[in-house]
Image (tube, grey):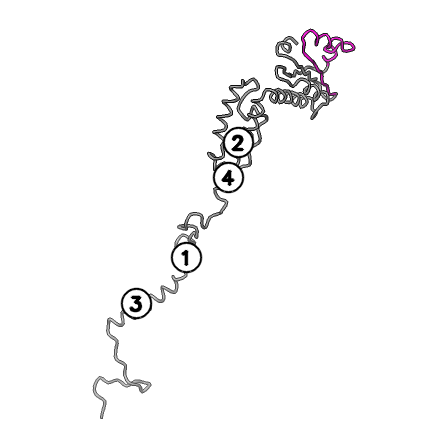
Amino acid sequence: GPPRPGDEQRGDGGAAQPEASDGAQGEAKGSKREHRNGSSRGNAEPQGGKADASKGAPEGQGKDPKEGVPTEEPPGPPQNHYETLGLTVRATTAEVKKAYYLKCRQHHPDKNHADPHATMKFQRVLEAYQTLSAPTKRAQYDATLVMQQACGNLGVQTDPRATQFVQRHSVPGREVQAMQVEARHVALLVGKNGLQLQSLKQQSGADILVLQNQLSVYAQVLLAGALPALMQA
């Protein structure tokens, strides 16, 4: 029959499609806007730049494994056993023992887990005490220190005569000391044919050895004997 009023002819000859409701149209528009905005924001970086991968990660992850590990170089060794124990060469036996116990508590590895050099320091303390607590070892050690300093002042590493001198006098009750004099005064000290030096030895009761180096303007004089004799010399 003839078309009814309100019917619309489609250009493609198809049937008319029902008109969408207002709610459906709004929902469709909203999804389109969301799709457009989401496509532009979906891969966007968070505000402020890239996120730190290490933020919020458990401790120990996302960090340099070496971070926090001490990188300081091992401390230089003490110059001698007295320095290790914090003493002077005139320290008494009681003072050596007291310093030993204090340093043991200070450097014991079980109490210094964070110090990678604790074991080395503790071993130095043990070695220092073993030497300085034994009278014979301490006498030999003290004499060797004096000889090393005298040779160093002359600019030489060692001197065979000085080594023999120290070995001969490294006994408890005797000391080896050193003094420095100008090389130009050595002739007066020794005297003609060494007679002045021999006389000085006899009067003081101390043994005396004069060390010289042609390249040095100073001479080193080693003296060995009991302390009163050294004071007199």
The amino acid on which the numbered mark 4 sits, given as a three-letter code, is Pro
The magenta region covers 184-213
The residue carrying mark 4 is 70
First in sequence, mark 3 or 4: give its number.
3
The amino acid on which the numbered mark 2 sits, given as a three-letter code, is Phe
First in sequence, mark 2 or 1: give its number.
1
Q: Residue at x 33, y 85 (%)?
A: 12
What secondary structure is found at the residue carrying circle 4? loop
The residue carrying mark 1 is 45
Q: CA distance from mark 3 to mark 1?
A: 24 Å
Residues at circles 3 and 1 in contact by the CB criterion of under 8 Å: no
Residues at circles 2 and 1 in contact by the CB criterion of under 8 Å: no
Relative to 207, does residue 126 appear above or below in the rendering? below
The amino acid on which the numbered mark 3 sits, given as a three-letter code, is Gly
Q: Position of residue 25 (x, y in %)?
A: 27, 72
* Mark in front: 3 vs 4: 4
The residue carrying mark 2 is 122
Q: CA distance from mark 2 to mark 1?
A: 55 Å
The residue carrying mark 3 is 30
The amino acid on which the numbered mark 1 sits, given as a three-letter code, is Glu
